[in-house]
Image (cartoon, helix red, strand yellow):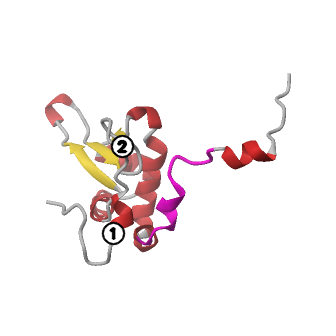
């Protein structure tokens, strides 16, 4: 049996993406390098709402998924942190084969509301200084 077509009201309410509209319209997103946008897209597609705003992904996985080099991915992650799109929740543990765990700031994490730190980004100011 075929599904009934969506009404105009249903189409307006439909969720077409895994990220808020304010993310792609903010000045921080507009200033991202293209390679950082590619890595951010991987975080957007990889971090599902039922993951509680967390995403575990190692460097090797990002290299395989994006096709970018290790140094390029490291630079992109640094920029995403500095601009407030992601924050590291847990460092990797190579002995246990565990990847770093990231929090995407546009989703709830550990019962806290989204911080959306990227909305507060200003040129020359680091929101999450990287070590």
When asked about the image quadrant of residue 55, the answer is top left
Disc on the earlier residue, 2 or 1? 2
Q: Quadrant of the N terminus?
A: top right
Q: Position of residue 69 (x, y in %)?
A: 34, 58
Q: Position of residue 126 (x, y in %)?
A: 23, 68
Residue at the farthest bottom position: 124
Q: Residue at x 44, y 53 (%)?
A: 66
Horizontal arrangement in the rendering, residue 40 relative to residue 5 (left or right): left
When asked about the image quadrant of residue 74, the answer is bottom left
Which-is-in-front pick, marks 2 and 1? 1
Residue 61's mark? Answer: 2
Task: State whether residue 9 is above or below residue 72.
Answer: above
Residue 64's mark? Answer: none
Magenta residues (range): 15-27
Element carrying mark 2: helix
- Whether residue 21 is visible: yes
Q: Residue at x 33, y 58 (%)?
A: 73
Q: Residue at x 34, y 52 (%)?
A: 115
Q: Position of residue 93 (x, y in %)?
A: 16, 36
């Amino acid at each position: 049996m075929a599904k009934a077509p969506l009404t105009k009201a249903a189409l307006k309410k439909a969720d077409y993406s895994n990220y808020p509209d304010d993310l792609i319209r903010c000045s921080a997103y507009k200033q991202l390098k293209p390679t950082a946008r590619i890595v951010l897209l991987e975080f957007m597609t990889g971090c599902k709402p039922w993951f509680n705003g967390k995403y575990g992904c190692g460097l090797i996985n990002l290299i395989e998924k994006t096709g970018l080099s290790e140094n390029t991915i490291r630079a992109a992650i640094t920029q995403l942190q500095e601009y407030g799109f992601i924050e590291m929740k847990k460092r990797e543990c190579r002995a246990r084969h565990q990847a770093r765990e990231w929090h995407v700031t546009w989703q709830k994490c550990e019962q806290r509301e989204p911080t959306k730190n990227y909305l507060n980004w200003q040129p020359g100011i680091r929101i999450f200084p990287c070590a």
